[in-house]
Amino acid sequence: MSDMNSGIQFRSEIADANDKCTVTDKSTPERVHGYQMEVDPSKRAWSGGIFDEARRGWMYSLENNPSAKTAFKPTDWNHYRIECIGSSIRTWVNGVPCAHLIDDMTLKGFIALQVHGIGNSKDIKEIRWKNIRIQTENLKASPSNNIFVVNTLPNKLSEEEVRQGYKLLWDGKTSAGWSGAYKDSFPEQVWKINDGVLSVESSSGAESANGGDIVSTEEYGAFDLQFEFKITDTANSGS
């Protein structure tokens, strides 16, 4: 039914209110946290997406893979598959590849079957499960399916991303491949590289006070550029 919601927790843990772990919502005693493969019969149609329960929220929604939105069949039996090998997490619904997440926050945990939304109806509703099986030995990664990869590992590419043609524009360690705008060198006195993060600070609104912009030493035409950034609430930046 479209007003229900369910999922499969995997690589999950339980934390109490005093547990010093990665769970962000500790308001409920013995709160389950970890990865969840979504069962979503609503019009949103994110079945097969990956949600991080009580921690970071959506890690891979089906907006990253819209063609998979039709894989789930409401009111019919659906075949779900989750493949976890190292930091690679992949999902399928009825044989259709839905999500590919590279993440290493939790590499081991329990599996749970859940229902966490039943709407306001007083009618009796059911979620049914059958043919549940797991393989833990002789694992072999499934062949590439060329869907979009969400990779949370800092400055690291997965084999699938390399296969798809991605490369690191910044190596996370040095200023290689970058220079100051209108300069022959990298402005190391103001642009800092620490713990895989490139940052610049300024107490002045003038860009010149920062040592100016930095630019790539190579030029690009057609491309797909991805990056993560964080700024203070009064900062202004761009790419």
Image (cartoon, rainbow, N blue to C red):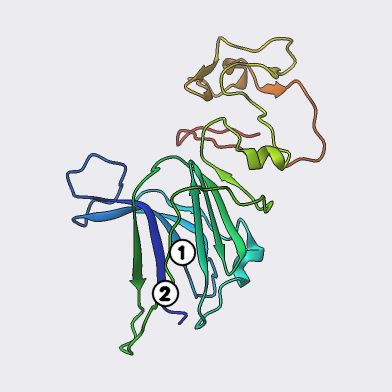
Percent across and percent down for residue 206 are 58, 21
Residue 239: image x %, image y %? Answer: 66, 34
Disc 2 on helix, strand or loop? Answer: loop
Q: Residue furthest bottom?
A: 123
For the residue marked with disc 2, what is the amino acid?
Lys
Direction from residue 99 to residue 5 in the image, left or right: left
Seen from the viewer's position, the closer of residues 235 and 239 is 239
Query: Farthest residue toward the right?
Result: 221
- Count the marks: 2
| Residue indicated by mark 2 | 130
Q: What residue lies at 56% left-to-right and 9% top-to-bottom?
A: 189
Above or below: residue 134 compared with residue 195 = below
According to the image, label 1 marks what residue? Answer: 38
- 205 in relation to 119, above or below: above
Q: Is residue 217 above or below residue 96?
A: above
Q: Residue at x 30, y 88 (%)?
A: 122
Of the numbered discs 1 and 2, the one sitting upstream in the chain is 1
Identify which residue is drawn at 47% across, 22% down.
Answer: 195
Image position, residue 155 (x, y; %) = 56, 30
Kindly state the secondary structure of the residue where label 1 is placed. strand
Contact between marks 1 and 2 (CB within 8 A): the answer is no
- Mark pair 1, 2: CA separation: 17 Å
**Along the horizontal axis of the image, is 217 left or right of 51?**
right
The type of residue carrying mark 1 is: Glu
Location of residue 184 (image quadrant): top right
| Left or right: where 208 falls relative to 86 | right
